[in-house]
Amino acid sequence: MKPLRHPLVPGPGIRTRQTELLISERDNLLAQAAKFFPGCRHREIARRLRSALSTYRNGRWRRDRIEATCPPQHKGKLVQIMWMILKTIDAIPCDRTVRTALAQSRIQTRFEVADPLFVAQHRMDDDPLR
């Protein structure tokens, strides 16, 4: 007979709440980064963003990752968003992940415009203190 797993420890293949929050934060940051590529389709944004993230991660990120806050020279630039993405999850997301995050952010903004009650309920569901 197998020993019982502790009820607070998720089983194999089940993401913890912390992991889900990190992924959600990364997806929000990917949607913010897309604003630096106006007029492009999601596929093109994903390609350009992955290229920029790869360049940054293989170069400047090696020095910037030890910082507790984003270096001041990056404020207001795409590099600031890339720094936050890599600080959240130190991995470059694949094209499909970026496109999915962009599509979900687009759907979410449609609901925000259409139904303010949905937004209020959705934000209450994301409350970590609840």
Image (spheres, rainbow, N blue to C red):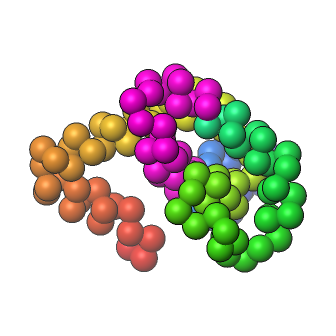
Q: Position of residue 50 (x, y in %)?
A: 67, 35
Q: Which image quadrant for residue 10? A: bottom right
Identify which residue, 95 or 123, lies in the foreground: 95
Indicate whether residue 47 is drawn in magenta. Answer: yes
Whether 118 is among the magenta residues is no
Q: Is residue 112 visible?
A: yes
Give residue 9's position: percent from left, percent from top.
67, 60
Q: Residue at x 53, y 62 (%)?
A: 76
Residue 96: x and y in percent read: 58, 26
Choose between 68 and 72: the one closer to the eye.
72
Q: Which residues are magenta?
A: 23-48
**In the rendered picture of this protein, how many numbered marks are placed on residues?**
0
**Is residue 55 shown left or right of residue 28?**
right
Residue at x 65%, y 73% (from the top left corner): 72
- Relative horizontal placement of residue 46, taking residue 5 as reference (left or right): left
| Residue 121 placement: quadrant | bottom left
* Residue farthest toward the front in the current orientation of the protein: 73
Residue 102: image x %, image y %?
44, 36
Q: Residue at x 61, y 60 (%)?
A: 80
